Amino acid sequence: MKEDVKLAKWLEGSMDENELREFMASPEFETYRKIKDYSAELVAPQTDIDALYTKILQNREPKPVRKLTPWFARIAAVLFVVLGVGYFFYTTQTTNHIAAAGERTEFSLPDNSTVVLNAASEAQFRTWNWDNNREVELTGEAFFKVAKGEKFDVVTPLGTVTVVGTQFNVKAREGRFYVSCFEGKVKVSSKGREIMLTPGQSVIFEDGKNIAEPSADGTQPGWIVYDVAFKKEKLENVIAEMERQYNVDITLPAGTYSLYNGHVKMNDLKTALQQIELSYQLKSVREGDKIILTRE
Amino acid sequence: MKNFSVKGICEEITFSAFFKEHAKSLRNYLYYKFGNEEQAEDVTQEAFIKLWQNCADVPPEKAKSFLYTVANNASLNQIAHQKVVLQYAQKNTHVHTDGHNPEFLMEEDQFRVKLQNAIAGLSEAQRTAFLLHRIEGKKYQEIADILGISVKAVEKRIHCALVELRKQIDNIR
């Protein structure tokens, strides 16, 4: 290894004396000596260093621009996307409540208004900006006890109910939009028609027409205590209500029936069926979830 | 080493002094590397501009190393080495020239030409190290810093350069 750099040591002047003496005696020494001497006379081509400096000074402008370091930009981008997506989901996120057939659900809205969902119904609302946008989308039937405040809307496919601090029932099923007011004032609008309800009043729209304005007795709808009053109701609708409440399948023999007036128990299937059987001279056979009504 | 002010090389006086101290060496080094004056000057200019732009981030003691690093990196993109043409200084006439016969003088001139050609025929690595020592008068340690290699490696290159030069000059195959 030492042999490899011998000449470098010599050129540098750091070769030890013994080696140097030996080297100077060697035949190739003369050439090396000349290389050393003559190479010292060499110069690089001249250049105008001052001109170069002037060029560099001209290039110093524009002053160094501090760039946003890439990691910062990356974090900012990720944050932007995450916040953006988060904000989007937060503002558009809806809360859903569903009551299946034969079940009920009670829940609170952000302002502590309470809603009782009747069987086979669904309610949906947005928590974000609730105070300025109190709106519940409803399909089916529900009883609302609304806290005092600004406008409160219940939007159904059949129409909208607008209220200020009140208790009312909304039923929107099979083309029939039935609203009862128990407290406060309720404005019902359906297909361009509007009607104001005061406590004790109800309104029924069917296919966009105001077909009846029965009274709303008591302080809450009958279904809350499993006792539903029907007034001049088609038997098919009564049966449909029973199917929802008891989560059963009821077959009614074809034919025309007189309108039903009266109460139907919604927590006692046997009694409820007996009421229907007595009123219409029918007989029932039960097989599991299926009930078949036949004429006597 | 000169002492630079606390504000560092962003100060124009400091930058200018630093330039005067290192520009020529850098340019020559790049010339030995490329064998092309224009290329050497372009890269020198580029390196100093980079230094100027980053003056706030480069402490004065690191400026030289920064300069050569930038130059070496920029060199990676450079190609096409031309023949390195070196001149002998005018005052080269040896003291002992007087009194020598014309034959000796002619031999001397012949040797100079042979040496020029032999240097041009060296590999880039050997030539650069050899000329930094012979012309720029750099110590092996400085050369090692400039090239980013160990002193041992510099010594090896110098040694091999010498062996190669003698082979060329003495026509040994």
Image (cartoon, coloured by chain):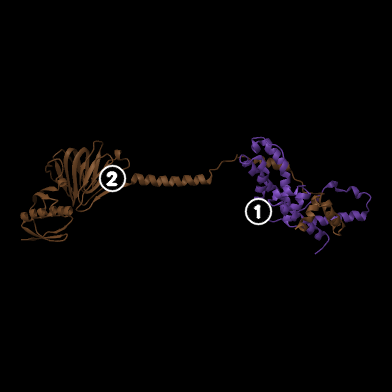
Chain colours: A brown, B purple
Residue in the foreground of this view, choosing between A168 and A220? A220
Q: Quadrant of the N terminus of chain A?
A: bottom right
Chain for mark 1?
B
Q: Please give the label number shown on residue B76.
A: 1
Residue A20 x %, y %: 84, 54
Q: Which residue is mark 2?
A: A125
| Farthest bottom residue in view | B173
Q: Please give the label number shown on residue A152.
A: none
Q: Is residue A275 left or right of residue A132?
A: left
Res. A107 visible in picture: yes
Q: Quadrant of residue A274?
A: bottom left
Chain for mark 2?
A
Describe the element under mark 2 as helix, strand or loop: strand
Q: Residue at x 88, y 56 (%)?
A: B107
The vertical placement of A47 against A35, above or below, is: above
How many residues crowd around disc 1 within 10 Å: few (fewer than 14), some, or many (20 or more)? few
Residue A68 x %, y %: 53, 43
How many residues crowd around disc 2 within 10 Å: few (fewer than 14), some, or many (20 or more)? many
Q: Is residue A158 left or right of residue A133?
A: left
Describe the element under mark 1 as helix, strand or loop: loop
Q: Is residue B69 left or right of residue A134?
A: right
Q: CA distance from mark 2 to mark 1?
A: 65 Å
| Farthest front residue in view | A18
Q: Is residue A54 left or right of residue A276?
A: right
Q: Quadrant of residue B53?
A: top right
**Amino acid at circle 2:** Phe
Q: Residue at x 53, y 46 (%)?
A: A70
Residue in the foreground of this view, choosing between A162 and B67? B67
